[in-house]
Image: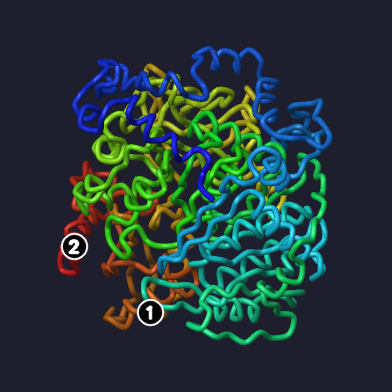
Amino acid sequence: MTNAGSGDRDANADERTSADERAGGGDPSDAAADPSDGGVAPPSWFREEAALTDPGIYDEFDTEWPDAWGRAADLLDWDRPYRTVLDDSEPPFYRWFPDGRLNAAANCVDRHLDGRRNQLAIRWFGKRGERRSYTYFDLHREVNAAAAALRELGVEEGDVVTLYLPMIPELPITMLACARIGAPHNVVFAGLSAEALATRLDAADSAYLVTCDGYYRREDAFNQKSKADNARLRIDGDLAATVVVDRLGDALSVPLGEDEHDYGTLIDRHDGETVAPVARDATDLLFVMYTSGTTGRPKGVEHATGGYLAHVAWTARNVLDVRPDDTYWCAADIGWITGHSYGVYGPLALGTTTVLYEGSPDYPDRDRVWDLIERNAVSVFYTSPTAIRSFMKWGAEYPDAHDLSSIRLLGTVGEAITPKAWRWYREHVGGGDAPVVDTWWQTETGAIALATLPGVTPMKPGRVGPPLPGIDARVVDETGDPVAPGEAGYLTIGKPWPGMLRGLREGEKRYRREYWLETDDGWRYRTGDGATVDDDGYVTILGRVDDVINVRTRRFNTAELESAIVAVDGVTEAAVVGDGDGGVVAYATTRSGVDPDDRTRAAIRDRLAATVGEIARPDRVVFTTELPKTRSGKIMRRLLEDITQDDEFGDISALRNPEVVGEIESAVRDDG
């Protein structure tokens, strides 16, 4: 089967002009502009086709709020239509479309069978060159079989099912199977450790686990089942059932124990069965996702079915401009919120073709991403600034060697993107004129909250954009008052929004404490990000104010990593920072009499890998007699980050121990 819309991409490229012409000019309104001049206008060819082109959408959402969010809900099919858009009677516990009922799997699969049953829903590419494709009819059959298998094992409506799988088709299929029978899913990133999995199984009160025998890390087969087995030994109580996907075949044979089941055997037993979708209240739990907490203990963020699905569908359509005839690729792992929202639920709700890729962007060659885009005529590509910086380091010759004219829109997510990276991305991947949509959002927001609307608002390289229509985001000072343009403050959101978390697994008290500030103007959500805003309302994200770092596009709280390091014998204090390329650099001090050596360094690396996952294994471990601290005792991680990345740092007079800076610089040079 082929994508119904893939043949239209070259025609669109011809209408826009050739890649060389696009890189050099064309419509004057399409030319790159400095942000101070109002930004980069959406290209004329894009404005003519965009899903949303009316600038009045901002005013409409302001004057009709919250009812305007009905536009998002109306993108879905409802088993029982909603009458109320928002119940805000018990803030900060907001309930969206509370009297409506729907099923997420039916919205992502069943409703597309009439018109697009033979269109590709998923194109999957494995790490070793494998390929699998699923039409919407195929996906419907697989999801139903998986739903019937889960029911056979005893999974009932409301039971939390934990999924510990790499980027293979069985992951989205099982997510949708859970949604079909009303069982919330709890996806745990496959790279996390056995200890991290056990913590999340216990915290979610999950008695069912779906995992696999293993997966490939470059050429090596990695045993995932052994980590799952170790997690089972650590949890409180027993699992009711474990399902194991055979990913590696003959490359790794794993025995199945009591209450363990082979995924393929279960699916074959229920192939052809149909399971009626369970109508769920819009406020019912769709999934729980664990994210780092300020205490070092993960937080179980809960997302409701109706508001979340409406918000991701609306933003996928109007921010990422995803259409049913697109071949769309969100490069994020499904183990994180971006993969949930814009790798699975958003594109499938809109009936498009979504690309899933298991491998690394540089394996087997550094042009792997561009080869996949060219071969599959990908029209919308959504990735992270960390990945873009890697692409830049490898060289423009890799994307330039491929025909990327199918690209209609580019997106970025996960952290702030520099103007230099933004322009490189647009020039070498977007042909010089494709819109680049920088997006800001979080696990807790569920969906995009700040971004330009590509058919409406100009783009400003390095600035994420204004709040989306209906999002009351403001940059405020410590008292909650708005800051002046250009001044640094705290990014907050006032009015509720549909994709927002409905609460925390850990209870109401922690939910209020972690996220909410009660002011004279009502409750405001605290994002934890510092930001500035310009005269046009465009926000620039400055980074976390609660010490969170990005590790290879995954976000971790420093407390989670540092608490693991100080558990190593002899280590008294630790600080972790990013190296600018998605890696981790750990700074550690040891107690008097302990001479740090390579064994201590290895113990720190191994401890992080064991408690958090291989993804958190530090690229470098630097020992120092002291860490730089303010007079109040707060570690100056920003200074450590500047030293790590060999950047200039400013005034250090606020430090109580400024003499340690030179020592740390020397230690970094010696370690490097």
> Looking at the image, which is closer to me, 604 or 31?
31
Q: Which mark is residue 663?
A: 2
Q: Which mark is first along the chain, 2 or 1?
A: 1
Along the line of sight, the residue nearer the viewer: 137 or 662: 137
State the separation of the CA atoms marked 1 and 2: 23 Å
Would residue 645 be found to the left or right of residue 253 on screen? left
Q: Name the foreground residue: 639 vs 166.
A: 166
- Name the residue type under label 2: Glu
Q: Is residue 480 visible?
A: no
Q: Secondary structure at mark 1?
A: helix
Find residue 408 and report its horizontal and vertical position in percent: 39, 33
- Is 186 left or right of 46, judged from the image as shown? right
Q: Position of residue 388 (x, y in %)?
A: 31, 47
- Check disc 1: other Cα within 10 Å, few if <14, some if 14-19, many if 20+: some
Quarter of the image where one finds residue 281: top right
Q: Which residue: 39% across, 25% down?
A: 533
Task: Look at the picture and state if 17 lies above or below 423.
Answer: above
Task: Judge left or right: residue 643 versus residue 183.
Answer: left
Q: Label 1 amino acid?
A: Ala
**Circle 2 crowding by C-alpha within 10 Å: few under 14, some 14–19, many from 20:** some
**Pick the front one: 284 or 639:** 284
Residue 603 is marked as: 1
Position of residue 199 relative to residue 551, above or below, is: below
Give the image location of residue 299, x and y in percent: 60, 55
Residue drawn 51% across and 44% down? 3
